[in-house]
Image (spheres, rainbow, N blue to C red):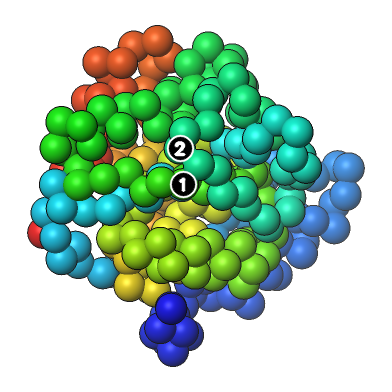
Amino acid sequence: MIPKARIETVEIIEDLNDWQRRYDSWSSAGPNRSDSDYPFVKNRRAPFTPARRALPMLNLALVSTAGAYIDGSPELNPDEPVFREIPIEVEASDLLFTAKGYDPAAINQDINSQVPVERLLEFERNGVIGQLNPVFWSFSGFIPDANSVVNELAPALAERLHRYEVQAALIIPASRLCHQSAGLVARVIEASGIPTMTLAVLKDVVESVRPPRVALYAGELGSVAGKPNFPEHQRRILDEALRLIEP
Protein backbone atom coordinates (compact mmCIF):
# COMPACT_ATOMS: atom_id res chain seq x y z
CA MET A 1 0.00 0.00 0.00
CA ILE A 2 1.05 3.59 -0.64
CA PRO A 3 2.10 5.64 2.39
CA LYS A 4 -0.51 8.31 1.58
CA ALA A 5 0.56 10.64 4.36
CA ARG A 6 3.94 10.92 2.67
CA ILE A 7 2.42 11.97 -0.66
CA GLU A 8 0.28 14.59 1.06
CA THR A 9 3.36 16.28 2.52
CA VAL A 10 4.88 16.75 -0.95
CA GLU A 11 3.66 19.45 -3.31
CA ILE A 12 3.38 17.74 -6.68
CA ILE A 13 2.39 21.09 -8.19
CA GLU A 14 4.16 23.62 -5.99
CA ASP A 15 2.22 26.79 -6.80
CA LEU A 16 -1.11 25.29 -7.70
CA ASN A 17 -3.04 28.56 -7.60
CA ASP A 18 -0.65 30.19 -10.05
CA TRP A 19 -0.81 27.24 -12.44
CA GLN A 20 -4.62 27.08 -12.16
CA ARG A 21 -4.89 30.78 -13.01
CA ARG A 22 -2.65 30.38 -16.06
CA TYR A 23 -4.42 27.21 -17.14
CA ASP A 24 -7.90 28.75 -16.81
CA SER A 25 -6.78 31.71 -18.92
CA TRP A 26 -5.38 29.40 -21.60
CA SER A 27 -8.40 27.10 -21.52
CA SER A 28 -10.91 29.97 -21.78
CA ALA A 29 -9.53 30.85 -25.22
CA GLY A 30 -11.42 27.83 -26.55
CA PRO A 31 -10.79 27.07 -30.23
CA ASN A 32 -8.38 30.01 -30.42
CA ARG A 33 -5.96 28.56 -27.88
CA SER A 34 -2.64 27.23 -29.10
CA ASP A 35 -0.74 24.22 -27.80
CA SER A 36 2.42 26.33 -28.11
CA ASP A 37 1.00 28.67 -25.44
CA TYR A 38 0.18 25.92 -22.98
CA PRO A 39 1.07 26.95 -19.37
CA PHE A 40 3.36 24.21 -18.09
CA VAL A 41 3.59 23.46 -14.38
CA LYS A 42 6.52 25.21 -12.68
CA ASN A 43 8.29 23.45 -9.81
CA ARG A 44 11.54 24.26 -8.02
CA ARG A 45 12.11 21.06 -6.05
CA ALA A 46 11.40 17.36 -6.51
CA PRO A 47 10.60 14.46 -4.17
CA PHE A 48 13.34 11.85 -4.03
CA THR A 49 13.45 8.19 -3.02
CA PRO A 50 16.87 6.50 -3.18
CA ALA A 51 17.15 3.11 -4.83
CA ARG A 52 17.79 0.45 -2.23
CA ARG A 53 19.01 -2.22 -4.63
CA ALA A 54 21.36 -2.41 -7.59
CA LEU A 55 19.81 -2.75 -11.06
CA PRO A 56 20.45 -6.53 -11.30
CA MET A 57 18.23 -7.00 -8.25
CA LEU A 58 15.37 -4.65 -9.18
CA ASN A 59 11.84 -5.39 -10.33
CA LEU A 60 11.55 -2.65 -12.96
CA ALA A 61 8.23 -1.24 -14.15
CA LEU A 62 7.72 0.37 -17.55
CA VAL A 63 5.26 3.28 -17.75
CA SER A 64 4.47 4.70 -21.19
CA THR A 65 2.47 7.80 -22.14
CA ALA A 66 2.11 6.64 -25.76
CA GLY A 67 -1.52 5.61 -25.31
CA ALA A 68 -1.12 1.87 -25.90
CA TYR A 69 -4.14 -0.37 -25.48
CA ILE A 70 -4.97 -3.93 -26.54
CA ASP A 71 -6.84 -4.29 -29.82
CA GLY A 72 -10.45 -5.12 -28.98
CA SER A 73 -10.42 -3.32 -25.63
CA PRO A 74 -11.95 0.16 -25.12
CA GLU A 75 -9.92 2.89 -26.79
CA LEU A 76 -7.83 5.18 -24.61
CA ASN A 77 -9.29 8.64 -25.06
CA PRO A 78 -6.97 11.67 -24.97
CA ASP A 79 -7.53 14.01 -22.03
CA GLU A 80 -8.84 11.19 -19.81
CA PRO A 81 -6.76 10.39 -16.69
CA VAL A 82 -6.97 6.61 -17.05
CA PHE A 83 -4.39 3.94 -17.80
CA ARG A 84 -4.19 0.40 -19.14
CA GLU A 85 -2.34 -2.50 -17.54
CA ILE A 86 -0.85 -4.65 -20.31
CA PRO A 87 0.94 -8.01 -19.92
CA ILE A 88 4.43 -7.89 -21.39
CA GLU A 89 3.64 -11.07 -23.37
CA VAL A 90 1.16 -9.17 -25.57
CA GLU A 91 2.51 -8.93 -29.12
CA ALA A 92 3.13 -5.54 -30.69
CA SER A 93 0.70 -6.48 -33.47
CA ASP A 94 -2.08 -6.73 -30.86
CA LEU A 95 -1.60 -3.17 -29.61
CA LEU A 96 -3.18 0.05 -30.85
CA PHE A 97 -2.20 3.59 -29.87
CA THR A 98 -4.00 6.81 -29.10
CA ALA A 99 -1.26 8.90 -30.67
CA LYS A 100 -2.26 12.46 -29.85
CA GLY A 101 0.52 15.02 -29.78
CA TYR A 102 3.12 12.88 -31.52
CA ASP A 103 3.71 11.31 -34.93
CA PRO A 104 3.06 7.54 -34.68
CA ALA A 105 5.29 6.73 -37.68
CA ALA A 106 8.18 5.48 -35.54
CA ILE A 107 6.08 3.41 -33.17
CA ASN A 108 4.27 1.85 -36.12
CA GLN A 109 7.65 0.83 -37.55
CA ASP A 110 9.10 -0.41 -34.26
CA ILE A 111 7.23 -0.39 -30.97
CA ASN A 112 10.54 -0.44 -29.08
CA SER A 113 11.24 3.11 -30.18
CA GLN A 114 8.62 4.23 -27.66
CA VAL A 115 7.53 1.15 -25.65
CA PRO A 116 10.79 -0.83 -25.31
CA VAL A 117 9.50 -4.09 -23.87
CA GLU A 118 11.79 -6.23 -26.05
CA ARG A 119 14.88 -4.22 -25.13
CA LEU A 120 14.09 -4.43 -21.42
CA LEU A 121 13.50 -8.18 -21.65
CA GLU A 122 16.96 -8.42 -23.22
CA PHE A 123 18.30 -6.51 -20.22
CA GLU A 124 16.57 -9.02 -17.93
CA ARG A 125 18.09 -11.99 -19.76
CA ASN A 126 21.54 -10.36 -19.67
CA GLY A 127 21.33 -9.52 -15.97
CA VAL A 128 21.28 -5.75 -16.44
CA ILE A 129 18.02 -5.61 -14.47
CA GLY A 130 16.62 -8.16 -12.06
CA GLN A 131 13.35 -8.48 -13.93
CA LEU A 132 10.90 -6.53 -16.03
CA ASN A 133 7.58 -6.39 -14.20
CA PRO A 134 5.11 -8.82 -15.83
CA VAL A 135 2.76 -6.00 -16.85
CA PHE A 136 3.50 -2.50 -18.08
CA TRP A 137 1.29 0.56 -17.81
CA SER A 138 0.23 2.94 -20.55
CA PHE A 139 -1.88 6.07 -20.71
CA SER A 140 -2.42 8.87 -23.19
CA GLY A 141 -0.20 11.61 -21.82
CA PHE A 142 -1.84 14.39 -23.82
CA ILE A 143 -3.73 15.65 -20.75
CA PRO A 144 -3.85 19.44 -20.43
CA ASP A 145 -5.47 19.34 -16.96
CA ALA A 146 -2.48 18.66 -14.71
CA ASN A 147 -4.80 18.45 -11.70
CA SER A 148 -6.46 15.35 -13.10
CA VAL A 149 -3.06 13.72 -13.61
CA VAL A 150 -1.99 14.47 -10.04
CA ASN A 151 -5.26 13.71 -8.27
CA GLU A 152 -6.67 10.82 -10.32
CA LEU A 153 -4.26 9.08 -12.68
CA ALA A 154 -0.97 9.17 -10.79
CA PRO A 155 -2.18 7.95 -7.36
CA ALA A 156 -4.09 5.05 -8.95
CA LEU A 157 -1.04 4.13 -11.01
CA ALA A 158 1.27 4.34 -8.00
CA GLU A 159 -1.08 2.03 -6.11
CA ARG A 160 -0.76 -0.60 -8.85
CA LEU A 161 3.03 -0.36 -8.81
CA HIS A 162 3.03 -0.96 -5.07
CA ARG A 163 0.74 -3.97 -5.46
CA TYR A 164 3.23 -5.48 -7.91
CA GLU A 165 6.09 -4.71 -5.50
CA VAL A 166 7.86 -2.64 -8.13
CA GLN A 167 11.24 -1.36 -6.97
CA ALA A 168 11.89 1.23 -9.71
CA ALA A 169 9.90 2.70 -12.59
CA LEU A 170 11.06 3.82 -16.03
CA ILE A 171 8.69 6.46 -17.41
CA ILE A 172 8.78 7.33 -21.11
CA PRO A 173 6.82 10.27 -22.58
CA ALA A 174 5.87 10.47 -26.25
CA SER A 175 4.81 14.09 -26.93
CA ARG A 176 5.58 17.55 -25.63
CA LEU A 177 2.62 17.62 -23.25
CA CYS A 178 3.40 14.00 -22.33
CA HIS A 179 6.65 15.28 -20.82
CA GLN A 180 4.59 17.18 -18.24
CA SER A 181 2.25 14.25 -17.56
CA ALA A 182 5.21 11.88 -17.22
CA GLY A 183 6.99 14.27 -14.89
CA LEU A 184 3.96 14.66 -12.63
CA VAL A 185 3.40 10.90 -12.53
CA ALA A 186 7.07 10.45 -11.64
CA ARG A 187 6.74 12.95 -8.78
CA VAL A 188 3.74 11.10 -7.32
CA ILE A 189 5.35 7.66 -7.69
CA GLU A 190 8.59 8.92 -6.14
CA ALA A 191 6.71 10.54 -3.27
CA SER A 192 5.00 7.20 -2.64
CA GLY A 193 8.38 5.54 -2.07
CA ILE A 194 9.37 4.10 -5.47
CA PRO A 195 12.40 5.56 -7.31
CA THR A 196 11.76 6.66 -10.89
CA MET A 197 13.65 7.53 -14.04
CA THR A 198 12.06 9.72 -16.71
CA LEU A 199 13.53 9.45 -20.18
CA ALA A 200 13.20 12.82 -21.92
CA VAL A 201 14.06 14.79 -25.05
CA LEU A 202 12.66 18.23 -24.10
CA LYS A 203 14.88 20.10 -21.66
CA ASP A 204 12.58 23.09 -21.15
CA VAL A 205 9.60 21.01 -20.05
CA VAL A 206 11.42 18.72 -17.63
CA GLU A 207 13.30 21.68 -16.13
CA SER A 208 9.93 23.32 -15.48
CA VAL A 209 8.04 20.28 -14.14
CA ARG A 210 11.07 18.70 -12.40
CA PRO A 211 10.63 14.94 -12.27
CA PRO A 212 12.99 13.47 -9.65
CA ARG A 213 15.47 11.87 -12.08
CA VAL A 214 15.79 12.63 -15.79
CA ALA A 215 17.87 11.06 -18.53
CA LEU A 216 17.85 13.81 -21.16
CA TYR A 217 19.25 13.40 -24.64
CA ALA A 218 18.82 14.90 -28.12
CA GLY A 219 16.14 12.51 -29.34
CA GLU A 220 12.82 12.85 -31.14
CA LEU A 221 9.23 12.95 -29.95
CA GLY A 222 7.48 9.72 -30.87
CA SER A 223 10.70 7.72 -30.57
CA VAL A 224 11.94 8.77 -27.15
CA ALA A 225 13.31 5.28 -26.37
CA GLY A 226 15.59 5.35 -29.41
CA LYS A 227 15.48 5.35 -33.19
CA PRO A 228 13.11 2.80 -34.79
CA ASN A 229 14.72 -0.39 -36.12
CA PHE A 230 18.00 0.60 -34.48
CA PRO A 231 18.23 -1.73 -31.45
CA GLU A 232 21.82 -0.74 -30.66
CA HIS A 233 20.74 2.88 -30.24
CA GLN A 234 17.78 1.86 -28.09
CA ARG A 235 20.00 -0.28 -25.86
CA ARG A 236 22.47 2.54 -25.35
CA ILE A 237 19.78 5.09 -24.50
CA LEU A 238 18.05 2.76 -22.05
CA ASP A 239 21.24 1.50 -20.43
CA GLU A 240 22.54 5.00 -19.78
CA ALA A 241 19.18 6.05 -18.33
CA LEU A 242 18.79 3.06 -16.04
CA ARG A 243 22.33 3.35 -14.67
CA LEU A 244 21.32 6.70 -13.17
CA ILE A 245 18.85 4.95 -10.86
CA GLU A 246 21.49 2.96 -9.02
CA PRO A 247 22.56 4.02 -5.51
Left-right relation of 86 to 237: right
Q: Quadrant of the N terminus?
A: bottom left
In terms of secondary structure, where does tag 1 sit? strand
- How many residues crowd around disc 2 within 10 Å: few (fewer than 14), some, or many (20 or more)? some
Q: Is residue 150 above or below residue 142?
A: below
- How many residues crowd around disc 1 within 10 Å: few (fewer than 14), some, or many (20 or more)? some
Q: Is residue 124 above or below residue 164?
A: above
Q: Residue 88, labelled with which disc? A: 2
Residue 210 location (% of width, % of height): 39, 58
The first of marks 1 and 2 along the sequence is 2
Name which quarter of the figure residue 225 lies in: top left
Are discs 1 and 2 less than 8 Å apart at CB?
A: yes
Residue at the location (61% across, 62% down)?
153
Residue wearing tag 1: 135
Residue 233 location (% of width, % of height): 27, 18
The front one of 8 and 70 is 70
Q: Is residue 115 above or below residue 132?
A: above
Say what amino acid the circle numbered 2 marks: Ile
Residue at the location (20% across, 47% down)?
130
Name which quarter of the figure residue 51 lies in: bottom left
